[in-house]
Image: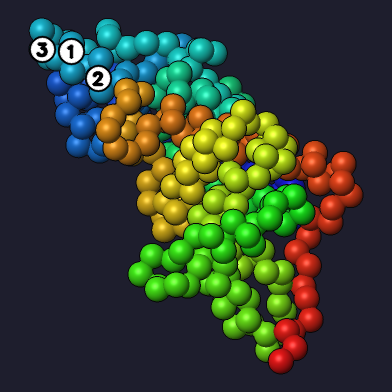
Amino acid sequence: MFGHQEQVTVRELMTRNPDAAGAGASVADVHDWLVENGYTAAPLRREDPPYLYVTRDDLAVVREESPDDRVYEHADRIDLSNLLSPDLGFEDLVVELEAEPFYFVGWHGRVAGIVTRSDLNKPAAHAFLYTRIGELEMRLRDLVDAEANWQGTLSMLQREGAGKTSEYDAVIEEFESYADADLQLREIDYTTFWQLQQAAVECDAVVDCLGYDDGEAVADALTDVRDLRNQVAHYGNVVHHMGTELLDSGRNVHELEETYAEIAGMLDALTAWAADEGVDTTRRAHAPVED
């Protein structure tokens, strides 16, 4: 169900044919141009190698002492250390962007694009992450349905502001509302991600299958995944801070890399479990509920 067509690469996220600054322009003029356009870095306009680039942060420092210098005098060379392939996948791209804030994209001997941390907020990244989290959610439901007493767990959780109604009552209400529909799924398929998380952390078999030491560790990982899920679903930024420092709120690229690694690890574990158990990982419809 989820194959190569669901992948996203640098090619879909990069800014193609990035604007270039004149090599003979002044440091001050190029710095102002970078700031005005919100660019982190830019190549210099040259007909022949070596290809050069400048960054906004570097020029801000140089400008204090030498604003009128020609910008090429303070440029760096584009080489293999700051070049990425357009075919690099999302997971590897996040790792690279954790190390450096931007890379140029090389293709056929030329600079074809630039990719930065802010590009992780583009729609193609949102769609990819939503697909991966959707796959995780679907496969986790299969595991919880097979291994956990999730009905009992949710029956013990009272819905906030709903009197004596339990979380399981809410699932059944949602399930029964589709009784007359052409397609009715399993009861477990009507759980919210939060409800699914509560059931997962209470089951040792689920915790062991996912490869965690205890339910608390699973809870922390699934909370991070749920936060990311909600943001990509509503097209909120998945990276809020372009630096790597840890702040009280928002997610940086390091934290995104950690959360995506959790998603990938859990998906690997769930895929292996399904293969070992011979579980059909496609959604199974049920006949309508009888009156």
* Secondary element type, mark 1: helix
Question: Up-down: is 244 above or below 166?
Answer: above
* Secondary element type, mark 2: helix
Q: Where is residue 163 in the image (x, y as percent from the top left)?
A: 40, 73
Label 1 near label 3: C-beta < 8 Å? yes
Query: In terms of image quadrants, where is residue 86?
Result: top right
What is the CA distance from the residue labelled 2 to the residue labelled 1?
7 Å
What is the CA distance from the residue labelled 3 to the residue labelled 1?
6 Å
Q: Where is residue 23 in the image (x, y as percent from the top left)?
A: 30, 18
What label does residue 57 carry, if any? 2
Q: Looking at numbered disc 2 in the image, what kind of residue is underneath it?
A: Asp
Instruction: Please tell me which residue is depicted at 38% across the width and 32% down the height of the picture.
Output: 252
Q: Looking at numbered disc 3 in the image, what kind of residue is underneath it?
A: Glu
Find disc 3 in the rendering and name its residue.
64
**Is 98 placed left or right of 1 in the picture?**
left
* Secondary element type, mark 3: helix
Pointer 2 local density, CA inside 10 Å: few below 14, some 14–19, many at least 20: few
Instruction: Please tell me which residue is depicted at 47% across the width and 57% down the height of the picture.
Output: 233
Find disc 1 in the rendering and name its residue.
61
Q: Which of 243 and 152 is in front in this view?
A: 152
Q: Position of residue 117 (x, y in %)?
A: 41, 32
Instruction: Please tell me which residue is depicted at 59% across the width and 32% down the height of the picture.
Output: 214
